[in-house]
Image (cartoon, rainbow, N blue to C red):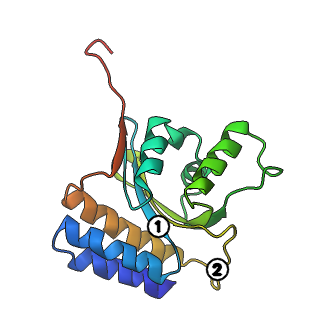
Amino acid sequence: MQTWFQKLIDASSVASTEASLREALPGLVHELGFDCYAYLNVQPVRTYAVSNYPEEWQARYFDRNYTRVDPVVAMARARMQAFSWTAGSPRQVRSKAVRAFYAEAGDFGIRSGISVPIRTAFGHMSMLTLASNRPSLSLETDIDQMAAVNAVALLHASLEHYDAKPTAAHSIELTAKQ
C-alpha cells in the first residue's frame, strides 16, 4: 500500500492540469482494488467533492447534507488518521439515519473502503476515500500513516492549485444581515 501512496504522490506531482490529475486517479484506485474515489473538502461554509462516485449519489449526498450523517466523515474528524471502514450491519448501527445512509450508499456500490483525512488551512479538513462494493475489507498490511497523509496532502495541494471544479458541492447561503 505504501507503493500505492507513492504513486499517488507521483501522479499529483507530474499532473500538469486538473484534467490530467482526474484522468490518473481512477486507474490508481482500480490498481489498489477499489471501485471509486471521493476527495471531500469540508469547510464550514462550503463543502465540495471531486469524485468518480455515481453522479446521482453525489447529488443526493449534498442535497441531503449527508456530511452531517456520514459516519466515515465523523470518524475522520475524530481520528484524523487513515483508517479502513465497512458499512455497519443493521444490528451494529443504532441510529436510524445512519442505517438509512448506509443502505443508500450500498445501493450505489459503496460498502467498504479506506479514508485518509488531513488538516487543511484554518483548521478545516479534507479527506480522500477509496470505496469498494465489497461488503467487507481486509488489508494485507496496515496503512502507513505518514505515506497516506503525505499523499493526500499533495493531492489536496494540487487540486487547490488547479482550483479544481467540484463534481458536487454544498454551500451555505447567508443573507447580508446574517
CA neighbours of label 1 inside 10 A, class few (<14), some (14 to 19), many (20+): many
Check disc 2 and report the residue beneath it: 139
Locate residue 142: give its quadrant.
bottom right
Task: Tell me the residue at 57%/77% (across/down).
Answer: 143
Q: Is residue 84 above or below residue 44?
A: below
Q: Looking at numbered disc 2 in the image, what kind of residue is underneath it?
A: Leu
Q: What percent of the width, then of the height, locates residue 46?
A: 35, 39
- Say whether residue 92 is left or right of residue 106: right
Q: Position of residue 158 (x, y in %)?
A: 25, 65
Q: Which residue is mark 1?
A: 36
Q: What residue is drawn where x is 51% and y is 43%?
A: 67
Place residue 144 in its image quadrant.
bottom right
Most foreground residue, 79 or 66:
66
- Give the structural element (helix, strand or loop) at label 2: loop
Q: Is residue 116 left or right of residue 99?
A: left
Residue at 25 percent across and 15 percent down: it is 176
Q: Residue placed farthest to the left in the image?
A: 16
The one of 12 and 134 positioned closer to us in this rendering? 134
Give the alpha-carbon distance from disc 2 to disc 1, as whole Å.
17 Å
Residue 165, position as x, y percentages in the image = 24, 53
Q: Nearer the viewer, mark 2 or mark 1?
A: 1
Q: Amino acid at mark 1?
A: Cys
In the displayed structure, does residue 176 sit left or right of residue 77?
left
